[in-house]
């Protein structure tokens, strides 16, 4: 890229295949993948990137085996317990995007606590997409706008691109400059569909647990 991206989004794909390639259970791939989040967050912050949005769990991921889903949900809780102090130390503001209301009460509680605790931070913004779908985000925005129209608080002719953005999950953040997808697939998988209209894409066959500074450097340089 000609300039350093302000906002990088990553589809963290390949945990299961990474584990399979090493003769390990799929959940081991997810465990290592969760540990990678801190490393990549720190690298992005060190390089001067200001916003990182990570696709951690899609709406479609609920169709995976129950044991795998339960493992992932517990790992998210563990991540929040483990990383809260580090996020404060590094000046990172944290939030989850997605249909948070559909998550377990215990996970919702931890998300609220960490979000509230880190909201004073301004050095770096970390968005974790959990129970997220780009189509669902657009539908949710339409629903919120339609309520205003029905209550005669908003005229239909006043609806434009800028107004619509205000009803997305991240209304105050700029759209991604760069979208990275690990794991070899070349599709966006219902991620940030509205926000990536003008985003540059970079795909790599490297599995997420193996993704590191050298790969990030290539993505930023290309």
Image (cartoon, rainbow, N blue to C red):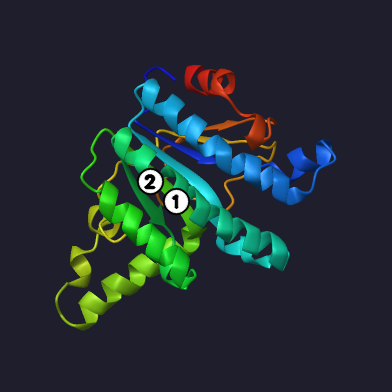
Q: Are marks 2 and 1 in contact (CB under 8 Å)?
A: yes
| Viewer-closest of 87 and 179 | 87
Image quadrant assignment for residue 182: top right
SS class, disc 1: helix
**Looking at the image, which residue is at 65% across and 35% down?**
209
Q: Which residue is identified by label 1?
A: 81
Which label is found at residue 144? none
- Relative vertical location of residue 139 with respect to residue 205 in this rendering, above or below: below
SS class, disc 2: helix
Image quadrant assignment for residue 61: bottom right
Query: Position of 87 compared to 219: left or right?
Result: left
The percent coordinates of residue 111 (x first, y second) are 39, 58
- Relative vertical location of residue 97 with respect to residue 108 in this rendering, above or below: above
Query: Position of 2 compared to 161: left or right?
Result: right
Q: Which residue is identified by label 2?
A: 84
Q: Residues within 10 Å of mark 1 (few under 14, many from 20)?
A: some
Query: Which residue extends farthest right?
Result: 23
């Amino acid at each position: 890229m000609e300039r350093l991206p302000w906002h990088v989004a990553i589809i963290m794909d390949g945990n299961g295949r990474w584990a399979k390639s090493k003769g390990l259970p799929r959940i081991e791939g997810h465990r290592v993948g969760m540990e990678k989040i801190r490393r990549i967050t720190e690298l992005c912050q060190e390089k001067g990137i200001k916003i990182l949005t990570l696709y951690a769990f899609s709406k479609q991921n609920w169709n995976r085996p129950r044991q795998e889903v339960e493992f992932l949900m517990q790992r998210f809780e563990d991540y929040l317990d483990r990383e809260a102090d580090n996020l404060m130390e590094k000046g990172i503001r944290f939030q989850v995007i997605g249909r948070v209301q559909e998550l377990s009460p215990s996970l919702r509680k931890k998300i609220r606590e960490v979000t509230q605790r880190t909201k004073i931070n301004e050095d770096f913004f970390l968005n974790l997409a959990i129970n997220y779908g780009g189509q669902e985000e657009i539908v949710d925005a339409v629903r919120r706008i339609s309520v205003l129209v029905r209550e005669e608080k908003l005229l239909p002719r006043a609806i434009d691109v800028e107004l619509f953005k205000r009803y997305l999950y991240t209304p105050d953040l700029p759209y991604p400059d760069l979208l990275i997808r690990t794991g070899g697939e070349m599709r966006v998988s219902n991620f940030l569909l509205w926000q990536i209209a003008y985003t540059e894409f970079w795909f790599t066959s490297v599995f997420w647990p193996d993704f590191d500074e050298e790969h990030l450097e290539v993505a930023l340089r290309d």
